[in-house]
Amino acid sequence: MSSPNAESVPATAPAAPEWFRPSAEVLQHAWVKDYDKVYKRSLEDPEGFWSDIAKELEWYKPWDKVHEWNYPFAKWFVGAKANIVHNALDRHLKTWRRNKLALIWEGESGESRTFSYYELSREVNRFASVLRSMGVKKGDRVTIYLPRIPELPIAMLACAKIGAPHSVVYGGFSVEALRDRILDAESKVLITADGGYMNGKVIKLKEIADEAVQKAPCVEIEIVVRRTGQPVPMEAGRDLWYHDLMSLPIASPRCETEQTDAEDPLFMLYTSGTTGKPKGILHTHGGYMVGTYITLKWIFDLKDTDTWWCAADPGWITGHSYIVYGPLLNGATSFIYEGAPTFPYPNRWWSMIERYGISVLYTAPTAIRGLMRFGEAWPGKHDLSSLRLLGSVGEPINPEAWRWYHRVIGRGRCPIMDTWWQTETGMIMITPLPCVALKPGSATRPFPGVEADVVDEKGNPVPANTDGFLVLKRPWPAMMRTIYKDPERYTQLYWNKVPGVYTTGDSARRDADGYIWVIGRMDDVIKVSGYRLGTAEVESALITHPAVAESAVIGKPHEVKGHAIKAFVVLRPGHAASDALVEELRAHVAHHLGPIAKPEEIAFLPALPKTRSGKIMRRLLKARELGQAEGDTSTLEE
Ligand code: PRX
């Protein structure tokens, strides 16, 4: 089976894998002590299993039915009424957690802000009242384009509170990406900021937002948070300052939480697929709430004494589920850091772990590999003894990075939860629990209630240690419900490849112990530093440049990023290849899509290899680039 993007940081099962077994201390602390027992029950009695968990949360009205399956469309907690914000905030105000810290935030330049559950809830209520008084109502989609500041979770929660689905666009995306997402969501309100800080530099978010809005006339109101204080143009009648609105009587701290249906949309989050058009992955209040709540609780063994840090951006699914919703649903204290891991020095993260007493760190292999390069002396300077557990997400973690993370950061004491999941799954799906023995590089076993398998094209399980398609065989509460406005594409993309099951787009193998080793994407999706990009998106950005006639993009293994983008470009007549043009094209992609999509390398070709039916053969370009066998070239055009 060929897998175009799969060969970097290979997650190969070593011949004699080393085991890391949980210590007595870890086991004693764990919510779940016997994985096999809980897993078995979850598959034998899924309704009982999921409803027991759901009962740990509050519902305005209980469900008539746990689950309804109208292949491939699922409903969970059918007939129930629940709002995720009621469980993330409102319900804690009735308990001692009212005065517990919900959020601790540190800005890149060192300032910090904290919010107790009471204070956070008050801010959310005030902003929700503002949105309501502006006419935003249940079902209206609000686009949020903010840097990593507390107003980002506040805005998300305010939207959810009034039943308005949010669509968060990552602050590292640029004009075209933002415009496409606003247009698809048909948002009338955009929430942005004057700018954001990253690596000591100001990112001009308002400038990008304005340019996007010019091409997305559905936006009637831009709410602008002041972060950097730099002067920005404010268009009369459209642009309003957040702090002005929050100082008006309309910003009432009394705000009823909308009694949403369990199946009402909570958010859409756009993600890259195999075509240039981003997909709006739709999640709902009830099932997503149950899934994010229990995965965070069991996998990271969260307790009230923890200070939890998920170092992702709230603008990605990891941040939605495990910076914002999961921690608040659990009544946890969640830490958010605004800036770059190495600013101003490579010990920034380790210093914050020490200063805030972080007990669980959840990050991506690319960040670990990046920080590894600076050596052990930087983390060595700091007391990291508050840590008790570590997590990894976003791409396969190579055993070398795993061991470094375990030895140097976890000081050999902290188990690593290598969690596999996707924007579409909403919650972590394949992962160890603290009571499970680990093998570096393997995401180990499915979470209770999740049935995963490695199969061939026909859906038959492949033998141990053989590559196959990673599939999910039964619905789960936090699963996406559809692609926004495109149920057809939802069915086609996820439920039509292998009969009867959800296709993840990843390849994997299972070893003789039943442990799953995820290898990587099998489609035209590239994971660059853990961020998901479609080749087609980058290609579409390139061909909007006047010098470019055609382009093809591949992912190339990269030591730190996992994969880096290489673009092949055919120039229009009258344009010549040059180093200056390479730089211009890279800047062009960054302007259109964002710096994360900037090609690492650009090569000029007289023509692209195509099939006789005119399809670009990226697979061939990739094989040539990596010096691999070209495989079947019988369809190649002469
Ligand atoms: O290829 C898998 C990879 O990330 C993809 C999903 O990307 P996204 O929707 O951006 O969500 C990322 C964070 C949940 C998957 O199809 N992936 C994610 N986690 C892992 C992983 N690959 C290997 N091991 C993981 N732990």
Image (tube, rainbow, N blue to C red):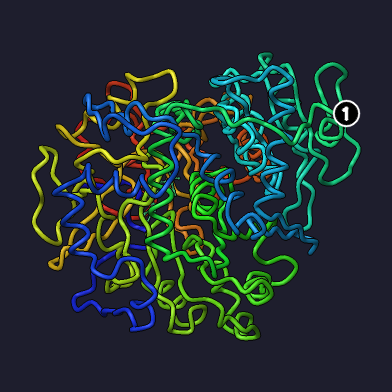
Q: Is residue 293 visible?
A: yes
User: Image point 41% across, 31% down: which residue?
Assistant: 61
| Residues packed near mark 1 inside 10 Å, few (<14), some (14 to 19) or many (20 plus) | few
Q: Amino acid at mark 1?
A: Pro
Which residue is at the front of the view, 298 or 421? 298
Spot occupied by residue 534 in the image (x, y as percentages of width and height): 45, 37
> Against 77, is 332 above or below?
below
Place of residue 477 in the rendered image (x, y in percent of width and height, measured from the top left): 33, 39
Residue sitting at x 66%, y 30%: 175
Check the image and report above or below for 32 versus 411: above
Q: Nearer the viewer, residue 215 or 391?
A: 391
Q: Is residue 390 left or right of residue 191?
A: left
Q: Circle 1 sits on which residue? A: 233
The quarter of the displayed image where residue 136 is located: top right
Mark 1 element type: loop
Asked whether residue 578 is in view, the answer is no
Q: Position of residue 478 (x, y in %)?
A: 37, 40
Position of 585 compared to 316: left or right?
right
Location of residue 411 in the rendering, given as x and y in whole percent from the top left corner: 48, 84
Q: Which residue shows up at 72% across the image and 60% down it?
A: 106
